[in-house]
Image: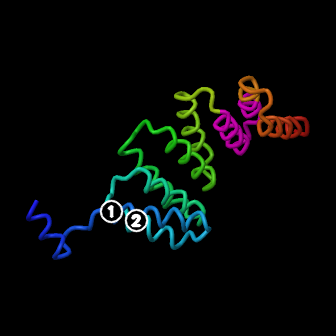
């Protein structure tokens, strides 16, 4: 303990709470739309606590907001190395992959989430969207209908279903 305290005095160890302070500041900056500054503070927090899942997620969301999808995907991949079954990370990775223009890879992530959370309405919609991007309209319609079987009042699924059925009619 004495060695650690002396190391802190010399600057060899980060002060306690530094990662949390950077993380909290980054969250506040991200909420204000100051994404570049938020990314800097998330990165600083990760230098102190490189395995912090919440900070990795915050940085990934920030990179997505900056349209730096490769960086966001790298953060989600890193999260999944620490927690391979993290359904939130898989879902967000799917969204980033979809935004990057990789619908097949995105679909794989959304299917993983649905295998663990079969009542996730948003994931059915997300899966339907990327299936449509691949020209698989019939499969997309099935996903929207699945969401509506779970919750018939889910407006997003209803709108997506109607749009997909229009596309199907106009083929």
For residue 138: magenta?
Answer: yes
10 Å crowding of disc 2: few (<14), some (14-19), many (20+): some
Residue linked to disc 1: 17
Q: Is residue 39 left or right of residue 125?
A: left
Q: To which quarter of the image does residue 42 belong?
A: bottom left
The percent coordinates of residue 23 (x first, y second) are 43, 62
The magenta segment: 121-144
Q: Nearer the viewer, residue 120 or 17?
A: 17
User: Tags 2 and 1 in contact by the CB under 8 Å rule?
Assistant: yes
Residue linked to disc 2: 21
Q: Nearer the viewer, residue 97 or 39?
A: 39
Q: Residue at x 54, y 27 (%)?
A: 115
The majority secondary structure of the magenta stretch comes to helix
Furthest-bottom residue in view?
A: 10
Q: Nearer the viewer, residue 77 or 52?
A: 52
Q: To which quarter of the image does residue 19 belong?
A: bottom left
For residue 117: magenta?
Answer: no
Q: Residue at x 50, y 57 (%)?
A: 60
Count of labels in the image: 2
């Amino acid at each position: 303990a004495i060695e650690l305290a002396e190391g802190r005095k010399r600057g060899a160890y980060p002060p306690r709470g530094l990662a949390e302070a950077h993380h909290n500041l980054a969250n506040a900056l991200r909420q204000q739309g100051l994404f570049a500054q938020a990314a800097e503070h998330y990165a600083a927090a990760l230098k102190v606590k490189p395995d912090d899942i919440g900070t990795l997620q915050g940085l990934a969301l920030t990179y997505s907001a900056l349209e730096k999808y490769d960086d966001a995907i790298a953060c989600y991949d890193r999260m999944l190395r620490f927690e391979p079954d993290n359904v939130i990370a898989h879902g967000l990775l799917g969204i980033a992959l979809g935004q990057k223009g990789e619908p097949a890879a995105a679909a794989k992530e959304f299917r993983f989430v649905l295998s663990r959370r079969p009542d996730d309405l948003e994931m059915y919609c997300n899966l339907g969207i990327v299936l449509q991007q691949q020209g698989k309209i019939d499969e997309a319609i099935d996903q929207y209908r699945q969401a509506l079987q779970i919750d018939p009042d889910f407006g997003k699924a209803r709108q997506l279903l109607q749009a997909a059925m229009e596309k199907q009619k106009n083929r």
